[in-house]
Amino acid sequence: MHIRQSVCQEITISDYFFHKRNENPVDIDAVRETLRVTYRDVFHMIYKKRQSYLRRGFKYKNPYRARWFKVSGFVCGEYRQNITVREQVFVCLTSGNHADVIFPYYVSKAYNVNSEMNSSTKCITGRFIFSYYTDKLVALAEEPSQAFIRPDFNVELYYLEKRKHHQPGEN
């Protein structure tokens, strides 16, 4: 199994998707044909055509790609709306009550989301999850990729704070 498939599975089995959004994890191999026929743009983001003349067809790749997103929140004590940020993301999928209805999400590269970044405490890996259809930030998944959701938790504010002090891919 590809590492991004594992990350997607860990994220999409969380309570956030199951209970709050009423969505289920997707077996990428089981929905491959549905993606190819019905969700062509998503299919081509995840699968790449094989270059070998010996093996035809498509291979799972799901590469990181740069994408722009809008987030809102308080930055330095001032509320800012629709701040545009560029993230390196890959695609994760969930399904609704009917397996043929697919919901794609963008997942960021890993960040250290430990709130005590200057301390000697351990790194806590987290990824930000964006809506595919609205380009809005929807959740934060922390290791072991469980969604971090509290009624008073503002994921967009948290994201902006992390971006202010830490760029994706840094230690």
Image (tube, rainbow, N blue to C red):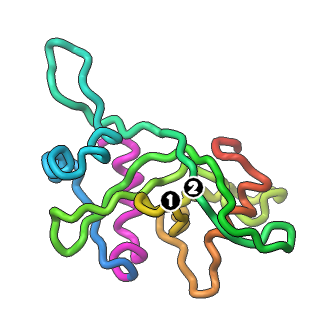
The quarter of the picture where residue 158 lies is: bottom right
Residue, x 36% and y 64% (percent of image)? 12
The residue beneath circle 2 is 69
The residue beneath circle 1 is 135
Q: Residues within 10 Å of mark 1 (few under 14, many from 20)?
A: some
Between 114 and 60, the one lying in front of the other is: 60
Quadrant where the N terminus is found in the figure: top left
Up the image or down, 53 lies above or below 36; here it is above
Q: Is residue 110 left or right of residue 17?
A: right
Q: Position of residue 105 (x, y in %)?
A: 41, 58
Up the image or down, 111 lies above or below 66; here it is below
Quadrant where the C terminus is found in the figure: top right
Between 136 and 150, the one lying in front of the other is: 136
In magenta, the rendered stretch is 1-19
Instruction: Give amino acid for label 2.
Output: Phe
Instruction: Give amino acid for label 1.
Output: Asp
Q: Are marks 1 and 2 in contact (CB under 8 Å)?
A: yes
Which residue extends farthest top?
Answer: 53
Of callouts 1 and 2, which one flags the residue occurring earlier in the amino acid sequence?
Answer: 2
